[in-house]
Image (cartoon, grey):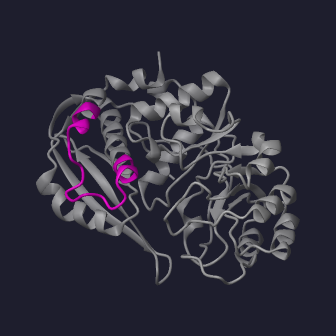
């Protein structure tokens, strides 16, 4: 039985919907907004998912007009609910970023439905999947420069402050065109870098990095054990990447098994971000394929501000707990690093019913 088949026939009763906004201001230029999707059952139960669409106007429109335009009340199985979503317009106005935003929002509704169906059944996801949650290894993901980027050389200060307060933390960093040899030497000296997100698969976004073969050469040589995520594979870079293709991983292009098979090299490791897959059926097919084919996976997030972070931690603890999961507790994303954050590995803390990570 596939992982999806184990959950597909769970009964689901929805009486009403709710939408609750969350936001966190990182600086004057960037405020992260998300929306909690709340599916209410007839007996007071609530299932919650988190919409991680990046454009704030999409959240404003959903919170203002969603209650008037989206009606999902009824009796379903999880699978029939997913089919209902195929026929439902989840954006009161067209999304700013099109298809990728549609997948993010679809994940929010489907994860909320999974939470509600499990709550109504009085069972946990671990129980239904017959998987044991394990302590969750995580890395902390960050960009060292300003956001959005400027032309100032980047400094290691943020990394050094983090490691001083939380020694032993492992990191996933975004090399940019502002990295220098001096910066790289300091980072190498920390011994903390597990993976490097080259952002070569992003085009027309605020996180774009201009492809620079010398930057690729520098970080490939300086960090010989680090994973190399989302390089731009071009005439300029392919000769550099071919010898280290077993270290190349993928994130932004991966929405299905077919996308993995379409990569230039068969990966040893992929980043599975649940929100990129949309329907639960696509996500669980990916988990099963990786397990069957011997491809490792690590989890990734979208700067979730609410229970969506717990969802990706829960899934990682069930399917790939020991890899460099980009699933650190949300406090690590805050502009001012809080005291008392949990460190890696996270002990499993799942609710007895529902799709809930309780930390």
Q: Residue furthest left?
A: 68
Tell me where residue 180 sits by quadrant: bottom right
Residue at the far front in the pictured view: 235
Q: Which residues are magenta?
A: 82-103
Place residue 249 in its image quadrant.
top right
Taking the image as shown, residue 167 lies to the left or right of residue 151, namely: right
Image: 47 above or below 223: above
What's the residue at 46%, 59% (across, down)? Answer: 304
User: Which residue lies most toward the top here?
Assistant: 1
Residue 77 at least partly seen: yes
Image spot of residue 52 (x, y percent): 40, 57
Residue at coordinates 37% horizontally, 65% vertically from top-left? 55
Q: Is residue 124 left or right of residue 226?
A: left
Could you tell me if residue 124 is visible in this image?
A: no
Q: Position of residue 14 (x, y in %)?
A: 19, 39
Residue name at image x 65 percent, y 82 percent: 151
x, y percent for residue 138: 66, 51
Tell me residue 167's x, y (percent). 78, 64
- Name the foreground residue: 85 vs 132: 85
Q: Residue at x 63, y 61 (%)?
A: 141
In the displayed structure, 354 sits above or below 167; it is above
Number of dots carrying numbers? 0
Q: Please tell me which residue lies in front, 227 or 338.
A: 227
Residue 251 is left or right of residue 121, and the answer is: right
Examine the rendered structure and indicate whether residue 20 appears above or below residue 326: below
Q: In this view of the protein, which residue sits in the foreground, 190 or 239?
A: 239
Q: Say if the magenta span includes residue 93.
A: yes
């Amino acid at each position: 039985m596939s992982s999806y088949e184990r959950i597909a026939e769970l009964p689901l009763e929805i009486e009403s919907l709710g939408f609750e906004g969350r936001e966190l201001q990182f600086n004057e230029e960037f405020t992260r907004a998300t929306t909690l999707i709340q599916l209410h059952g007839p007996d007071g139960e609530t299932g919650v998912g988190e919409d991680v669409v990046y454009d704030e106007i999409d959240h404003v429109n959903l919170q203002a007009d969603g209650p008037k335009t989206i009606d999902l009340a009824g009796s379903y199985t999880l699978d029939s609910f997913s089919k209902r979503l195929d026929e439902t317009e989840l954006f009161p106005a067209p999304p700013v970023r099109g298809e990728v935003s549609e997948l993010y929002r679809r994940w929010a509704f489907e994860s909320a439905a999974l939470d509600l169906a499990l709550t109504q059944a009085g069972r946990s996801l671990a129980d239904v999947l017959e998987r044991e949650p394990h302590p969750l290894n995580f890395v902390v993901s960050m960009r060292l420069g300003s956001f959005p980027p400027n032309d100032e050389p980047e400094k290691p200060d943020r990394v050094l402050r983090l490691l001083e307060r939380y020694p032993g933390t492992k990191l996933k960093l975004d090399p940019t065109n502002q990295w220098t040899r001096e910066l790289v030497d300091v980072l190498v000296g920390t011994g903390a870098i597990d993976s490097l997100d080259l952002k070569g698969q992003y085009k027309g976004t605020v996180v774009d990095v201009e492809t620079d073969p010398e930057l690729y050469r520098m970080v490939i040589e300086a960090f010989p054990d680090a994973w190399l995520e989302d390089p731009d594979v071009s005439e300029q870079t392919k000769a550099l990447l071919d010898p280290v293709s077993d270290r190349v991983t993928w994130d932004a292009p991966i929405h299905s098994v077919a996308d993995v098979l379409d990569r230039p090299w068969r990966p040893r490791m992929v980043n599975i971000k649940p929100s990129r897959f949309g329907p639960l059926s696509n996500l669980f097919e990916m988990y099963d394929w990786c397990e069957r084919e011997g491809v490792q996976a690590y989890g990734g997030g979208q700067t979730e501000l609410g229970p969506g972070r717990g969802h990706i931690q829960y899934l990682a603890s069930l399917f790939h707990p020991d890899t460099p999961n980009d699933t650190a507790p949300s406090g690590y994303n805050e502009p001012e690093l809080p005291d008392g954050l949990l460190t890696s590995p996270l002990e499993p803390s799942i609710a007895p019913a529902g799709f809930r990570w309780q930390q």
